[in-house]
Amino acid sequence: MFDSILIGATIILSLSILASLYRVIKGPSMPDRVIALDTIGINLIAIVAIVSMLLRTYAFLEVILLLGILAFIGTVAFAKFIEKGVVIERDRDS
């Protein structure tokens, strides 16, 4: 019974990823696209966690941490790009 609930949650999360992918492609503005990408990252973390529970293993916990770090860094980089137009600032003095 618990496995069927987890499979149903995985299907719902997959549909949520598809909806977010549509928002990434058709988003009205750049911040909406960044939020959709962050949502995709969070949903991927949830799917990997559910797969880890279905397989009854701890092997995917490092993958969850890696996806979380990459999603955070990507969101920060996109936010900086939207705000300043560049991700890496270079000093022009030297």
Image (cartoon, grey):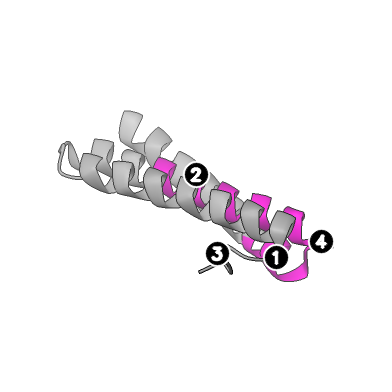
Quick check: is 60 in the magenta stretch?
A: no
Q: Which residue is mark 3?
A: 91
Name the residue beneath numbered marker 4.
Answer: 29
Q: Quadrant of the image for the N terminus?
A: top left
Counting residues from the N terminus, which is met first, the one under dot 4 or under dot 1?
A: 4
Q: Does residue 49 appear to the left or right of 41 in the view shown? A: left
Sequence-first disc among 4 and 3: 4
Residue depicted at 37% across the width and 49% down the height: 67
Q: Which mark is residue 42?
A: 2
For marks 3 and 1 on the same chain, the one whose residue lies earlier in the sequence: 1
**What's under tag 3, amino acid-wise?**
Asp
Residue 78 vs residue 86, the one in the foreground: 86
Can the viewer see residue 82? yes
- The amino acid on which the numbered mark 2 sits, given as a three-letter code, is Ile
Q: Which residue is mark 1?
A: 85
| Front position among marks 4 and 1 | 1
Discs 4, 2 touching: Cβ within 8 Å: no
Q: Foreground: 73 or 84? A: 84
Percent x, y of residue 46: 42, 41
Cα separation, mark 4 vs mark 1, equals 15 Å
From the top left corner, tell me how far across and down residue 90 is, in percent: 54, 66
Residue 21, picture quadrant: bottom right
Q: Report the Cα–Cα distance between label 4 and label 2.
A: 20 Å
Identify the amino acid type marked 1. Gly
Q: What is the count of numbered marks?
A: 4
Mark-to-mark CA distance, 4 and 3: 30 Å
The mark closer to the camera, 3 or 1, is 3
Label 3: few (<14), some or many (≥20) within 10 Å?
few
* 90 relative to 71, above or below: below
Q: Which residues are magenta?
A: 21-46
First along the sequence among labels 2 and 3: 2
